[in-house]
Image (spheres, rainbow, N blue to C red):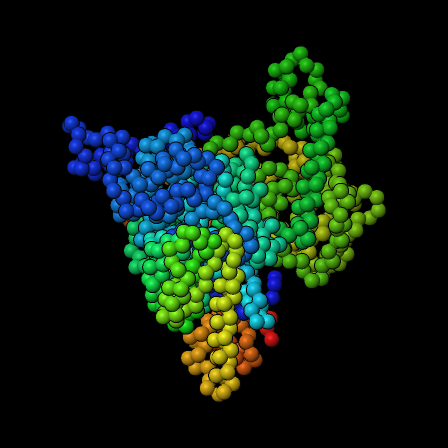
Amino acid sequence: MPPPSRWDEWKLMLGVRRFVLRAADKLAGSIVTQGGAPSPSAMYEWLLSQPCQYRALINIDVPRTLSCAKVLTDERKSMLTNILIAYANYDTSTGYIQGFGNIAVVLLVVSEWREEEAFWALVALMQGRGYRHFFKNDFRELTRYEKVFGYMLSRELPELEAHLTAVDFPPTRSITPKWFLSGFAQALPLNVVIPIWDRILAEGMPFIISVAMAMLAEMTPSLVRMDDKQTYHAFLHVKENSNFAGPQAAARLIHRAKRFPVPMPLQMYLLRTRDGFESDDDRFAHAKAVSESIRRLVRRHVRPPPIPPDTVLGQFLRHISLREAEEARERRRHSGSFQQPAEVSTPPARTDRSVTRDIRKNSSDSLVLSPNRAASVDPGKRRFIPVNARPPPPPYGLRPLMWRARAMPVPCCYMPSPNLQMPQMPQSGPAAIPLPPPMRAIPRPWRPPGAAPPLPNQVLKRDANADAPGTARVRGRSLSTVVEEEHGGEAGSSGEGAMSETDALPFNQNLDVAIGQLLDERAFLSQGGIRPPASLSDLMSFMPTPAIQEEPTHTNAAPSLSDTTSPDVQARQLVPPAPTENMINEATVRPHDNHPNDLPNDPIIPAVTRHIVGGSTERKASVGTDSTAVTAREREKEKEKEKKRRFTFTLRLPWGRRVGMGMGTCAGKDKERNGEKEKTRKGMRRVFSGVGRCFGRV
Amino acid sequence: MDAYDYLFKFILIGDSAVGKSCILTSLIENKFKKGSSHTIGVEFGSKIINVSGKRVKLQIWDTAGQERYRSVTRSYYRGAAGALIVYDITNRDTYHHLINWLADARTLARADISIIAVGNKSDLKDKRAVTFLEASRCAQENEILFLETSALTGEGVEEVFVKVAKMILNKIEDGMQHIEEGLGYHGLFSGLIDPATMMSGVHAGARSLLNEASPAEPASRCISC
């Protein structure tokens, strides 16, 4: 907001006009006019002329309103006095309370000392924004803000809170009155207060808590090293704190304040949403509990916990990122010169359309592509992904695996098993680790140059042919074979060549299992329409998978749904992959009549994606062929039975939000359990509504 | 952090603009702060003083003088061991309100709170409206201490706090004697000291008693005896 228009903006944000009109209504009886509503200036004059019981106190307080000491001449002092007296006369239930002067000075300064306008803005701020409630009713509003502030403090800056408690400095009680009631005018220089009030007016009053948190966060590093006297001194002279002076201070504080947002439930608590709570404490406890639980959920489901760098997985991720960095560097280096090896600019697989198109476009160019263009046809960025059609396919190579690994909170792989010997990584920083060569150049797992790698898990070392007893097996295959399969034929078939057992990365047994799960997951996804890299060259050469263009499974499965769902629901529908035996077996059906919320609780890769099992076409067809043999009556019966076996279910995210619903048929067998006949609910299901792209990570 | 034997909570009350904040600033920073602002709500200061060989940490709550802030101020009376009622010797009204403040403190604070009346601005002798004599007589009638100070010159400021602290210490020692004489602590400490907030560790016997009364608080924070 440029300075000249700031006052206009403030007036707009405060809605001053509305309060002038309201005042005209209120004072219409007392002010004699020649018809029509009294003008704002007439009202102001009238208010000033009334006797005021607070006049003496205001006269005492105005000269010692600290925030205006520098800007205040005698004339301006009288302006401030006038505003305060007029307000006390206008809002008689509030009157004048020490502290009003500070915010009035801020308004006067912003209005460039237009007394009357500043007065109406003060009215709007006090009444419209509820600022007077901070002072009224035994400061009840302030107490509420204090509670939230205390909660935020213990939540966001626990070390500061501990320090303040240790030096007997009660954090909330000694800070909030001074900072909040003066609108920071007693805590910050005026040129910082004004931009901050810009934000407070825009964001709402709870933002003052964020600002206070930002100030404390700024002070924390110095505060925690102070003793009690210095701490007290720091808070007393917070206005002289050099952190809060200077042209950048306001911007920095606001930026910081945005990192301490007041949780929505607590904002609602502060803004006094009407509810059925008996006492304010109850309301606060409730708001706190809600925000806590949201926080827990968010932490659990949205943000995967960081992987500690000293675990095997962490080190592996680090290797990957280092390798990628090196590769990027390599690419940059090559893009600097036009002379480059052909295999770098045109990988063998890149004989597809995108390249030929490029060549055609610039037919004057030689066949050697310019490196910049070669980089620009990076297929990962070029793919067309229809919105809502499917979750975005993972990119290629080991990276997606690692993304998934990062996203999957598998606790066992965070904890190295006791019999695992961790590789001793040099602690001196990234440079100490030998950088892996670029991915493209070496089509096999990287091995440090020179001598044999410091293989950590000699325990796990084994022959490629004969598995030692007790080594990990992932669903019948040892990890190494899985990896080999993943990486395609050439590496595997060449035997001793690329992917020998000793080259495998140091996985321990737990990790084996985890990776196995991931691979399963990946296999599943790949059957769901995402083509896995078929061979190693495919994997490494950034070949775009034509999966999307060539994926008509959608149309196969859709017809059976068209009668039950509206077209726009269908448009949002996820692509049902071709049904496979594997998927049906893996899926667990939980019809909502039994367990409405009890979906498989995989938090990151939500249960929902797994439930997208489509294509009841097979089944229907089989029913059809059967029914040719039986009579019409039997067919009727069959239909009746079929109807009975049908059930619906709802897909919910773990916190209960409904994201989809579906229908399925029980194809399970009758089972005796506890003497009761029970139908296992295993079968085909189909999702006919839901949200699309948000499934990638919820 | 400095070690101390006792922690006393004080509260500064009195009419608006009598110089409460200035007394506090003068005590803590040994200087007069010109152009200081009116207090909003409460302010807070602390200082360690030596009283009869003991290190006493004072935790002082400086309150706002305006009538409207009375409701906020009231919540600070409860834990206070000492109260300083400040009036302005150049303003007779503030002296008259002394009685009101005293009543407030008597009703809201603990029964044995140590109170001192402080006539501030003693440097403005030519504008004096309240004589030393009548004020001290009034204090005597109400059984409170009395002193005159000048926050501007710093005269008498520390004495005020020392005097109150001494009085509280005396009460504590009386309590000790009672215990040693076998009269028990019943009703004694409960009125005199809030062990959870004000002190910990007096004597071995007393400490155990105190800790029984409220085991929560920080014996470790203070060193004693």
In this view, the residue in front, A164 or B113, is B113
Residue furthest to the right:
A451
In this view, the residue in front, B40 or B87, is B87
Does A577 sit above or below residue A671?
A: above
In this view, the residue in front, A496 or A52, is A52
Residue B198 in percent (x, y) is at: 49, 69
Residue B188 in percent (x, y) is at: 44, 79
Residue A321 in percent (x, y) is at: 67, 41
Residue furthest to the bottom:
B182
Residue A377 in percent (x, y) is at: 62, 26
Residue furthest to the front:
B126
In this view, the residue in front, A158 or A32, is A32
Q: How many badges with numbers are in the image?
A: 0
Q: Is residue A633 visible?
A: yes
- Who's the residue at 77% across and 56% down the image? A458
Image quadrant for the N terminus of chain A?
top left
- Who's the residue at 68% across and 53% down the image? A310
Q: Hey, which quadrant is residue A244 in on the image?
A: top right
